[in-house]
């Protein structure tokens, strides 16, 4: 069952989200001695990362991954890696060898292939997982007004990649830039914990739709709901939801 929490404003969403990430990372460290965290871009996740950088986490036992990336250089202002570096990686002094960025500058195909290989080599699968799909401990996601997550867009062929897919190249993103790299739906669904964040009235319809019937027209609705935590502000909360 999806856990939905509504907060009074965007700052409170970020505070609640950062605390939840810390809780889940500590649980993974206690259980397995290592934690795998995947990050996304966006304003709300970015504020969450700023707060997370100041919280007590054993970063020397955490491996940092990415849910998606634009096919740009790592210093480009559109780079999700750059956002993470400025808000979390550098402030928290996370060792570079612990950070695994998607190499967007290689293009969607080569970049996706290399990232899939890195994930398969370093992240184990859950017992019984389909085709050995890597099992991340925590994935932080935003959601678009159209219901997309990572770079999985409504009706896109990447949604049909299959249960053994790990990472997909995107050439026709409806949002610029058109070329991207994204974790597959199978990997997002296999994650032990997924945290989805949304703020503002522009996200309210998307949140309501993702809580409805699963649909390829709303990729967020295809996430594994039993391991999904949704944190929104009141403006993005579905109509009638009471905190």
Image (cartoon, rainbow, N blue to C red):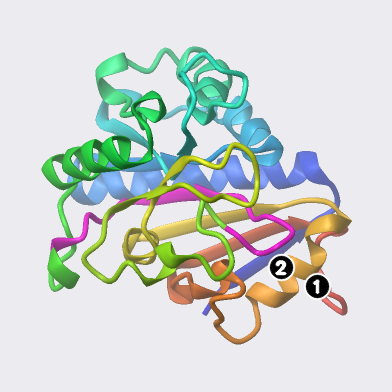
Which residue is depicted at the point 18% across and 71% down? 130
Element at label 1: loop
The percent position of residue 58, horizontal first and vertical second, equals 34, 27
The percent position of residue 191, horizontal first and vertical second, equals 35, 59
Contact flag, marks 1 and 2 (Cβ < 8 Å): yes
The percent position of residue 201, horizontal first and vertical second, equals 88, 57
Query: Local crowd at mark 2 within 10 Å, few (<14), some, or many (≥20)?
Result: many
**Is residue 25 toward the left or the right of residue 126 in the image?**
right
Q: Name the residue under label 2.
A: 207
Query: Local crowd at mark 1 within 10 Å, few (<14), some, or many (≥20)?
Result: many
Where 24 falls versus 205 (above or below)? above
Q: Give the range drawn in magenta.
A: 132-148
Which residue is depicted at the point 79% across and 44% down? 10
Q: Name the residue under label 1.
A: 238
Seen from the viewer's position, the closer of residues 23 and 83 is: 83
Q: Report how far apart the C-alphas of labels 1 and 2 lie in the structure.
A: 6 Å
The percent position of residue 109, horizontal first and vertical second, equals 31, 42
Where 118 falls versus 20 (above or below)? above
Which residue is depicted at the point 27% across and 36% down? 110
**Is residue 8 toward the left or the right of residue 62 in the image?**
right
């Amino acid at each position: 069952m999806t856990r939905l929490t509504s907060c009074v404003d965007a700052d409170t969403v970020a505070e609640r989200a950062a605390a939840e990430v810390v809780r889940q990372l500590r649980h993974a460290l206690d259980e397995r001695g290592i934690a795998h965290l995947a990050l996304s871009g966006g304003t709300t996740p970015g504020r969450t990362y700023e707060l997370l950088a100041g919280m007590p986490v054993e970063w020397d036992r955490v491996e940092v991954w990415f849910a998606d990336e634009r096919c740009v250089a790592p210093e480009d202002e559109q780079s999700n890696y750059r956002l993470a570096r400025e808000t979390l990686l550098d402030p928290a002094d996370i060792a570079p060898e612990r950070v695994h960025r998607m190499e967007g500058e290689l293009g969607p195909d080569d970049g996706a292939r290399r990232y899939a290989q890195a994930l398969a080599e370093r992240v184990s699968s859950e017992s019984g997982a389909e085709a050995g799909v890597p099992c991340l401990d925590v994935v932080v996601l935003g959601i678009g007004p159209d219901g997309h997550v990572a770079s999985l867009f409504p009706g896109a062929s990447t949604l049909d990649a299959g249960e053994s897919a790990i990472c997909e190249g995107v050439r026709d993103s409806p949002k610029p830039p058109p070329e991207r790299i994204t974790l597959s739906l199978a990997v997002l669904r296999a994650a032990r914990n997924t945290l989805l964040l949304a703020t503002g009235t522009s996200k309210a319809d998307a949140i309501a739709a993702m809580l409805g019937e699963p649909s390829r027209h709303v990729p967020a609705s295809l996430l594994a709901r039993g391991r999904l935590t949704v944190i929104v502000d009141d403006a993005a909360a579905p109509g009638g939801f009471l905190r």
